[in-house]
C-alpha cells in the first residue's frame, strides 16, 4: 500500500470526525502539512496541539502519520498505539483507520507478527473486511506462509470480487514473492469480470504479458479521456 494513497484516506476520515470547529486549529494545520509532505512541520503542529489540549486521539494519530512520512516506523507505531488507547467510546471508522496505519507501520518496521495481530484485531470486529484480509495475506506471504496468504487473498476477493485492482494487487504480491505462475490464476479470474473498463483490461493484459492487447485496450481508454495512469501504463 502506497503511503500517498494512505494520505488520501486519512485526510478524508479526518474531515469525517468533525474537526473543523473550535480547538482544532493546530490539528488542521498539521494535516495540511502532511498533505504537502512537510512532515517535520506537521509534528511541530501536533505537539502544539497536544500542549493546548486538542483531541488526543487525533493528535497521536497525526503524529504517527507524520512519522511514517519521515520513515520513523517504530515511532509511528508507538504514536498510533497511543491513539487507539485514547478511544473512549465505541469503535468507529476512525479507529479502523488508525489500526490500518498501525499495521502498516509495524510491517515497515519489521514487526510482522505485530502487523498480523493488528489485522487479526480488525477482522475480529469486521469479518468481511477485504482490505484486512489482503494486507494480512501480504504480510503472511512476506513471512513465507504462502498457503495461509492464499487463504487470506481468496477471502479478500470473496468479499470484493468485483474489484479488478484487487486481483492485480494479489498477483503482484505473488510475483514479488516468486510465485508469478500461481499468481496468474488471479489475473485470469479478473479477466472474467464483465464490468471492467478499458484501462482495467489494459492493466490486466499488461500483467499477463500480452502487451499488444494491453496497448490496444489502453489506447482506447486514453481516447475516453482517462487520467494520466493510462499514459504511464502505455509507457510501460
Image: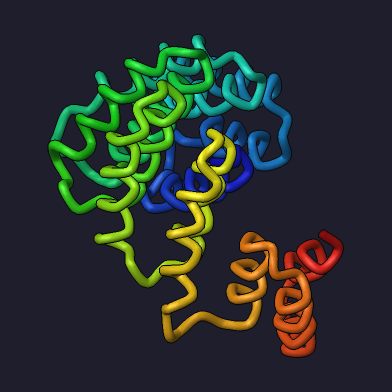
Viewed as shown, does residue 121 lie left or right of 56? left
Q: Exactly how many numbered labels are in the figure?
A: 0
On the rendered image, what quadrant is the C terminus found in? Answer: bottom right
At 56% from the left and 35% from the top, the residue drawn is 178
Q: Quadrant of residue 19?
A: top left
| Outermost residue toward the front in this view | 181
- Can residue 219 be seen here? The reply is yes
> Colour mode?
rainbow
Where is residue 197 shown, x and y percent of the image? 57, 82
Where is residue 222 shown, x and y percent of the image? 78, 82
At 50% from the left and 42% from the top, the residue drawn is 174
| Of the pair 64 and 215, the residue shown nearer to us | 215
| Outermost residue toward the right in this view | 235
* Looking at the image, residue 199 lies above or below residue 29: below
* Looking at the image, residue 132 lies above or below residue 228: above
* Looking at the image, residue 173 lies above or below residue 120: below
Where is residue 233 shown, x and y percent of the image? 76, 64
* Looking at the image, residue 83 lies above or below residue 163: above
Where is residue 219 shown, x and y percent of the image? 79, 82
At 81% from the left and 68% from the top, the residue drawn is 234
Viewed as shown, does residue 45 lie left or right of 85? right
| Of the pair 24 and 60, the residue shown nearer to us | 60
- Can residue 170 be seen here? The reply is no
At 42% from the left and 31% from the top, the residue drawn is 141
Amino acid at each position: 500500500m502506497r503511503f500517498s494513497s494512505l494520505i488520501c484516506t486519512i485526510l478524508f476520515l479526518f474531515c469525517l470526525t468533525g474537526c473543523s470547529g473550535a480547538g482544532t486549529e493546530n490539528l488542521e494545520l498539521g494535516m495540511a502539512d502532511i498533505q504537502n509532505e512537510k512532515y517535520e512541520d506537521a509534528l511541530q503542529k501536533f505537539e502544539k496541539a497536544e500542549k493546548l489540549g486538542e483531541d488526543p486521539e487525533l493528535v497521536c494519530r497525526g503524529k504517527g502519520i507524520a512519522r511514517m512520512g519521515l520513515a520513523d516506523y517504530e515511532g509511528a507505531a508507538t504514536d498510533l498505539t497511543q491513539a487507539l488507547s485514547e478511544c473512549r467510546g465505541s469503535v468507529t471508522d476512525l479507529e479502523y483507520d488508525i489500526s490500518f496505519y498501525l499495521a502498516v507501520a509495524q510491517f515497515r518496521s519489521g514487526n510482522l507478527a505485530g502487523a498480523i495481530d493488528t489485522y487479526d484485531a480488525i477482522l475480529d470486529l469486521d469479518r468481511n473486511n477485504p482490505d484486512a484480509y489482503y494486507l494480512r495475506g501480504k504480510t503472511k506471504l512476506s513471512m513465507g506462509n504462502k498457503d495461509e496468504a492464499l487463504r487470506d487473498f481468496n477471502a479478500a476477493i470473496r468479499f470484493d470480487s468485483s474489484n479488478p485492482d484487487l486481483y492485480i494487487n494479489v498477483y503482484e504480491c505473488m510475483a514479488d514473492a516468486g510465485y508469478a505462475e500461481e499468481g496468474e490464476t488471479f489475473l485470469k479470474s479478473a479477466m472474467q469480470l464483465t464490468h471492467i473498463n478499458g484501462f482495467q483490461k489494459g492493466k490486466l493484459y499488461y500483467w499477463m504479458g500480452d502487451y499488444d492487447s494491453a496497448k490496444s485496450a489502453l489506447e482506447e481508454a486514453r481516447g475516453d479521456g482517462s487520467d494520466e495512469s493510462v499514459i504511464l501504463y502505455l509507457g510501460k
